[in-house]
C-alpha cells in the first residue's frame, strides 16, 4: 500500500507544527470526533507537537465505547444460547457487560467468532443451515453499509438463520449533543474522515453555522491530523466558522451515493442510547420493517437481569470531552485494560486505552517515569 | 531423505489402510508401531533415535547444558512460509540459541487429533526433519498420542531441546546496561500477519510469508565476531514490544527506540494499518533482538549483514538509565510514546 509513509513525514510534520505555533495567540479547545483519530494522536505523539494553547478534546467516536451496556448484556445472552454462532468484530470481545464479557462466554463453551466483515457471517449462515448465526452490528456510518449489505444479501438468499444485533449510531447528532450541552468547551471540531467518506459532509454547514464552530473534515495519518488542527486554529484565530475538507483524497461533499442508497434500503433512523452519554434523539439506525425479521433482538430472549454500569466508571464524561482519561480516579488503578470498568479502556479506539497504552500517565518530559503496568 | 509422499510409499502396510489418523495410532499397539516405523523413523533417522529405547542415550558434551521446552499450537497447521513442524523445530532451536547455546538434540511429542490426514502428518514430519537438518540438530526421542476428533486442532507438537553453552559465552536478559545498543535482525511482524492473512474469517490477499527460521547459525557468527553480547531474545508472541519490555524489566533499565529505524516490510505495515494492529506487537518466528555494548554495534551489524538471516539487521535504539522498566519510542514525526507489553492477543479493530 502506498500513501502511508508520505503522511508520516517528520519534516512536513514539523513545518505544520510551526505554522500552528505561529498562528496561535490564545487557548483553544478542539475536539477530534473519531476514536481512530485519538489513537493516531497518541500513538504518533501528535499532541506533543502542538503549542500549549491548543488542547485536544477526545470525542465520542468509538463505536465500541458508546454501545450501551444493556446491548452488550443482550449480546452475551444471545451468544450463550445453544445453537448460536455469534459473530463479532474483535474489539467487542473484551468489552465488559454488567457481569462479564464475550471472552468469558466463549470460554464457557459459546461459539463466538471474530470476523472482519459481516459478509463472512452471511457465509457462515449459508454453511451452517442448522445453526442460528448472529452478527453484532455496531459502529458508526462507516461500518453500516457493509452491515446493510449483509442483511440485504441474507434476504436475497432467503436465509432464515441469519440475524443482526443492531447498535448503529450516527455522528452528526452526537456532535450536536456535545455542542448544545451547557458544559460544552469545544470550540472547533475535527470531523471523522471515514464517516464523511460514506455520508459526505453536507450535514455539517448548518451545525457550523448554528453553533458558530469551525468544522474540519480530517483524516487519520499524522499529517492529516496536523493539517486539520492547523486549519481549525487558523479559523478560530480569524473568527470564522465554515466547514472545510482537509481529507479530499477520501471524502467528497456528497459522500458515497451507492453506500447511502444501500443504507436507505435497509435502515431507518431511531433514537439511540449511547453508553455513558444517554439517549440522543434520532442518533441511530434500526432495521426497517421489511428487514425486521433479521433483527436478533426480536428473535432471541435478552438477559434475565437488569443492566448496570460500574458506578466508578467516568467514561461518559470522557466521551463528552469533559474529563481527560488520566483525570479519572480509577484510571490505571481500578481500571486498566486487564480489568476495564468501561469500554473506553478496552477498544483500540477508546481514549482511556490510548492514554494507558501510549503512556500519558507518565510525564516523559521530566523523566519521572514509572511503569504503567 | 526418504520420500514421505504417502502416494508413493513403498511400504504396503496398514498405514495405507487408514488415510487418516485413527485412535489406534496412539494405542501403543501395532498401529502405533507402524506409525513410528514408517513415518517418524524414516524422516528423523539418526543413531540416537534408531534403537527406539525408552530414552535416547547421548555422548558426553563439553560445557554447560541448556535445556528448554515449548508447545506448538497453530491454526491453520500450514501457512505461507511454513507449518507447525517448522515452528516446532525452529522455535526450540531459537530458544537454545538465544541463551548462547549450540543446539544439539530435540525431543518431539505429538498430540494428534483423530481424523488428521496422514498425508498432512507426513508433510509436517517432513518439514520438521528438513528444519532439523538445516539447524544441525537431531530429533532423538519422541512420543505420540491420539485424542478424539473435536478435541484438538489436528496436530499439537511439543519439542524439548538440549544444547551446550561454550565456555566464555554469557548472554542473559538481565545484563543490558545503559549506553548499550539494541539491534534487531530483520523486519518484524511477518509471521503474525502471515497467519492472520489466512485465518478463517479474516482472510485477505497477501504475499506475506512467515519468517520461521533457525537462528543458531546467525548467532554462532555473531558470537564469533562479538563474544560480549549482553542479551539476546527472539521476539515471538507479543512481538518486539514484549521482548523489549522483558529486557527493560529484567535489567532494570529504560529503553529508547527510534520507531522509523525498526525494519517493517511495506506489506506488513499496510496490513497492520488496515487491521488496526501495531507491527511492534505482532509475532515473529525467525528474528532476534540483541543488546550489545555501543562500541561493538557497528561490527556486529556488519557481521549480521553478511548472514542470510541478518541482511536487514538494524540498530533500533539504546539502553538508558532514564525511565527504568519503560520502553519509549520516538515516532516518525518526532513525538514520543510508551511501548507497553500487550495484554493478550491484539484484536482487529472495527473500522
Image: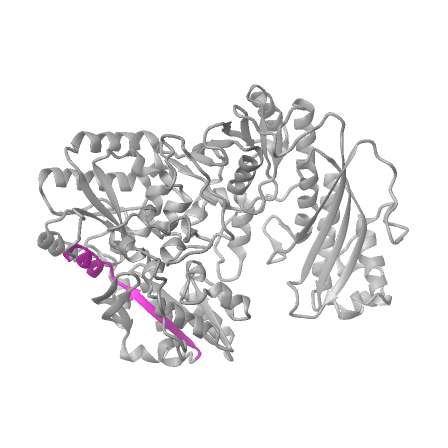
Residue at image coords 42%, 78%: A159
Against A97, is A194 above or below?
A: above
Left or right position of B321 against A170: right
**Colour pattern:** one colour
Counting from the top left corner in percent of width and height, residue B247 is at: 56, 36
Against A163, is B247 above or below?
A: above
Counting from the top left corner in percent of width and height, residue B117 is at: 70, 64
Q: Is residue A239 visible?
A: yes
Q: Residue A68 is drawn in which quadrant?
A: bottom left
Q: Which of these two is toward me, A208 or A372?
A: A372
Residue at image coords 37%, 58%: A342
Counting from the top left corner in percent of width and height, residue B20 is at: 73, 67
Left or right position of B290 against A94: right
Q: Is residue B2 visible?
A: no
Tag count in the figure?
0
> Does the magenta-highlighted stretch encompass residue A45?
no
Q: Which of these two is toward me, B234 or A313?
A: A313
Q: Residue B212 is drawn in which quadrant?
A: top right
Q: Quadrant of the N terminus of chain A?
A: top left
In this picture, which residue range is highlighted in magenta? Answer: A161-180
Q: Which of these two is toward me, A251 or A330?
A: A330
Q: Which of these two is toward me, B150 or B248?
A: B248
> Does the magenta-highlighted stretch encompass residue A177?
yes
Residue at image coords 48%, 53%: B205
Left or right position of B218 against B207: right
Left or right position of A260 against B221: left
Counting from the top left corner in percent of width and height, residue B50 is at: 88, 50
Amino acid at each position: 500500500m502506498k500513501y502511508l509513509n508520505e503522511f508520516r513525514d517528520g519534516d512536513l510534520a514539523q513545518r505544520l507544527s510551526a505554522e500552528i505555533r505561529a498562528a496561535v495567540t490564545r487557548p483553544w479547545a478542539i475536539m477530534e470526533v473519531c476514536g481512530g483519530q485519538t489513537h493516531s494522536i497518541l500513538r504518533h505523539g501528535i499532541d506533543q507537537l502542538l503549542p500549549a494553547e491548543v488542547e485536544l478534546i477526545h470525542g465520542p467516536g468509538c463505536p465500541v465505547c458508546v454501545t450501551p451496556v444493556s446491548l452488550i448484556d443482550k449480546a452475551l445472552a444471545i451468544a450463550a444460547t445453544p445453537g448460536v454462532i455469534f459473530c463479532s468484530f474483535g474489539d467487542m470481545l473484551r468489552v465488559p457487560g454488567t457481569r462479564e464479557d464475550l471472552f468469558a462466554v466463549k470460554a464457557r463453551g459459546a461459539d463466538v467468532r471474530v470476523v472482519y466483515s459481516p459478509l463472512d457471517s452471511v457465509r457462515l449462515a449459508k454453511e451452517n443451515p442448522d445453526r442460528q448465526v448472529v452478527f453484532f452490528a455496531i459502529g458508526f456510518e462507516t461500518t453500516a453499509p457493509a452491515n446493510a449489505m449483509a442483511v440485504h444479501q441474507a434476504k436475497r438468499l432467503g436465509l432464515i438463520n441469519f440475524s443482526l444485533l443492531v447498535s448503529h449510531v450516527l455522528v452528526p447528532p452526537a456532535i450536536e449533543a456535545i455542542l448544545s450541552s451547557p458544559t460544552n468547551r469545544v470550540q472547533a471540531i475535527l470531523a471523522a474522515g471515514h464517516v464523511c467518506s460514506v455520508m459526505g459532509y453536507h450535514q455539517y454547514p448548518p451545525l457550523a453555522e448554528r453553533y458558530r464552530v469551525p468544522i474540519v473534515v480530517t483524516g487519520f495519518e499524522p499529517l492529516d491530523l496536523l493539517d486539520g488542527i492547523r486549519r481549525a486554529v487558523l479559523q478560530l484565530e480569524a473568527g470564522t466558522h465554515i466547514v472545510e475538507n482537509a481529507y479530499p483524497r477520501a471524502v467528497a461533499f456528497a459522500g458515497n451515493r451507492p453506500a447511502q442508497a444501500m443504507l436507505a434500503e435497509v435502515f431507518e433512523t431511531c433514537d439511540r442510547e449511547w453508553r455513558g452519554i444517554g439517549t440522543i434523539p434520532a442518533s441511530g439506525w434500526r432495521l426497517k420493517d421489511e428487514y425486521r425479521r433479521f433483527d436478533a433482538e426480536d428473535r432471541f430472549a435478552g438477559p434475565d437481569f437488569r443492566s448496570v454500569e460500574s458506578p466508578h466508571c467516568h467514561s461518559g464524561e470522557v466521551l463528552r470531552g469533559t474529563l481527560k482519561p488520566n483525570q479519572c480516579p480509577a484510571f490505571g488503578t481500578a481500571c486498566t485494560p486487564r480489568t476495564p470498568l468501561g469500554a473506553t479502556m478496552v477498544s483500540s479506539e477508546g481514549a482511556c486505552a490510548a492514554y494507558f497504552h501510549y503512556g500519558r500517565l507518565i510525564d516523559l518530559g521530566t523523566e519521572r517515569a514509572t511503569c504503567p503496568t | 531423505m526418504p520420500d514421505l509422499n504417502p502416494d508413493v510409499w513403498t511400504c504396503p502396510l496398514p498405514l495405507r489402510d487408514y488415510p487418516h489418523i485413527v485412535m489406534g495410532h496412539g494405542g501403543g499397539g501395532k498401529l502405533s508401531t507402524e506409525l513410528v516405523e514408517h513415518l517418524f523413523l524414516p524422516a528423523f533417522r539418526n543413531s540416537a533415535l534408531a534403537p527406539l529405547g525408552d530414552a535416547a542415550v547421548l555422548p558426553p558434551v563439553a560445557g554447560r547444558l541448556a535445556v528448554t521446552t515449548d508447545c506448538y499450537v497453530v491454526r491453520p497447521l500450514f501457512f505461507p512460509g511454513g507449518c507447525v513442524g517448522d515452528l516446532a523445530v525452529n522455535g526450540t532451536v531459537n530458544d537454545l540459541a538465544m541463551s548462547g547455546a549450540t543446539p544439539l538434540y530435540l525431543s518431539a511429542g505429538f498430540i494428534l487429533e483423530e481424523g488428521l490426514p496422514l498425508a498432512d502428518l507426513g508433510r509436517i514430519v517432513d518439514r520438521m526433519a528438513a528444519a532439523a537438518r538445516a539447524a544441525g540438530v537431531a530429533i532423538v526421542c519422541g512420543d505420540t498420542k491420539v485424542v478424539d476428533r473435536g478435541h484438538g486442532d489436528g496436530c499439537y507438537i511439543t519439542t524439548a531441546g538440549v544444547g551446550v553453552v561454550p565456555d566464555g559465552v554469557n548472554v542473559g536478559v538481565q545484563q543490558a546496561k545503559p549506553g548499550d545498543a539494541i539491534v534487531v535482525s530483520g523486519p518484524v511482524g511477518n509471521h503474525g500477519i502471515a497467519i492472520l492473512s489466512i485465518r478463517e474469517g479474516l482472510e485477505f490477499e497477501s504475499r506475506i510469508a512467515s519468517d520461521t527460521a533457525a537462528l543458531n547459525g546467525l548467532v554462532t557468527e555473531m558470537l564469533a565476531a562479538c563474544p560480549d553480547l549482553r542479551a539476546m531474545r527472539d521476539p515471538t508472541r507479543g512481538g518486539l514490544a514484549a521482548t523489549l519490555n522483558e529486557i527493560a524489566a529484567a535489567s532494570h533499565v529504560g529503553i529508547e527506540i527510534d520507531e522509523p529505524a525498526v525494519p517493517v516490510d511495506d506489506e506488513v505495515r499496510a496490513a497492520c494499518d488496515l487491521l488496526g494492529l501495531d507491527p511492534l506487537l505482532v509475532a515473529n518466528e525467525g528474528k532476534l533482538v540483541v543488546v550489545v555494548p555501543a562500541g561493538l554495534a557497528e561490527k556486529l551489524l556488519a557481521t549480521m549483514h553478511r548472514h542470510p538471516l541478518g541482511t536487514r539487521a538494524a540498530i533500533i535504539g539504546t539502553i538508558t538509565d532514564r525511565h527504568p522498566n519503560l520502553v519509549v519510542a520516538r515516532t516518525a514525526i518526532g513525538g514520543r510514546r510508551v511501548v507497553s507489553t500487550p495484554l493478550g492477543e491484539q484484536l482487529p479493530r472495527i473500522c
